[in-house]
Each structure stands twice: as C-alpha cells, then as structure tokens.
Amino acid sequence: MALADDLVTIFGLPAHPLLVHAVVVLLPLSAAAATALAVVPKWRQRYAWPLLAVTLLGVGSVLPAQKTGEQLDARLASLDNPLIRQHAELGNDLLPFALGFGVVVVALLVAGRLADRERTAAADDTNVPRTWRRISVVVAVLVIAAGAATTVETVRIGHSGSTAVWDGVGAN
C-alpha cells in the first residue's frame, strides 16, 4: 500500500473499492454460515472455528473500508455528487451492525458449546437443567436476525456505492 496525497492506494488504485469487496463477500458469507450453524447445532463443533475466522475477517474489514472510503470521498468532494454523499452516509452505519453481528456469533459459539456439554450431561442424568440449551436457542434467533440485518445493510451500502459510480460519476 502506498500513501499518495492522503489517499491509500494498492498498486496505484484507490484502496476503497478493493477493500470493500472483503466486506461485501465476508459479511454475507459469515451471516449465511452462522444461520446454518444456528439452525443445525451439530455442525457447530466442526465449523465453529472457520465461522469465527470468516466473521472476524468480515467485521475487521469494515473499518479499513470506511477509512479509505472517507479518503476517497475527500478526494472526490469536488464532484459534488449527491449519490456519493448518500453512499458515504450509509457507509457510516455499517460498523454497529457488523460489531453486533460479531458479538452474537461469538455468543452462539459459546452458548452452543455449553449447550452441547449440558446435552451430554443430560444423557447420563435426567435432572440436568436445560439452561444453556434454552439460551442457545435464543442466541440462534438473534444470530439469524443480526445476520439478516447486517447483510441487508451491506447490500444497501454496496448498491448505493455502485450506483454512485456507474450512474453518478459519469453524469457530472
């Protein structure tokens, strides 16, 4: 990466359009995977670590995409394009969605692991409470909702950015 006039570039291209692809791919992918693990608990043991890795990469890529977007926005300010302005405003809203989603994914994996232990203990003793199994169901619902919200927000922001580029930049 090179720093030229306060604009981060990769191989001479603005970094924002390149970094955004990590967000656009990894967040919906982790949302789909988290939904699958929420719905099919037996997959949690096998796919918990890959889900955690993809989720952390997706959530972690939001801030660099936002920062490079702000740099690109400052560079393109002279265009006075309302579509770019709208995209920049929407882009500022993704981080809370992504962080919330990341937190509930971690909660799903922890509650799921504890629910699995509880389930194993219940096989030997029928008096074992179902506390973690109930909590894991609630967290699974939260994961599905947060994953859907994060995906919808990612698509909205991405669509506004592509609209700004393809419809707005050439119009000025």
Image: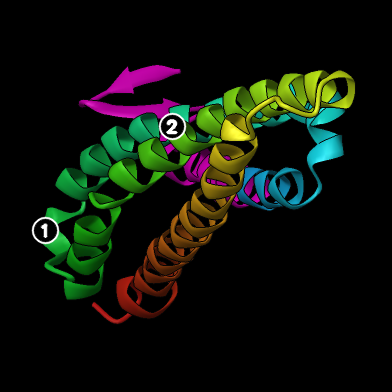
Q: Which mark is residue 103?
A: 2
Amino acid type, residue under disc 2 in the picture: Val
Location of the N terminus by quadrant is: top left
Q: Is residue 84 left or right of residue 63?
A: left
At mark 1, the secondary structure is helix
How packed mark 2 is, by other alpha carbons closer than 10 Å (few <14, some 14-19, many 20 or more), is some
Instruction: Please provide percent x and percent y for residue 78.
Output: 11, 58
Callout 1 touching callout 2 (CB < 8 Å): no
Residue 4 drawn at (x, y percent): 29, 23
Can you tell which mark lies on residue 116? Answer: none
Residue 11 seen in the figure: no
Location of mark 1 (residue): 78
Amino acid residing under circle 1: Ser
Which is nearer the eye, 82 or 61? 61
35 above or below 127? below
Specify the quadrant that holds the C terminus.
bottom left
**Residue name at image x 54 percent, y 26 percent:** 56
At 63% from the left and 48% from the top, the residue drawn is 25
Q: Is residue 160 magenta?
A: no
Give the magenta range.
1-29
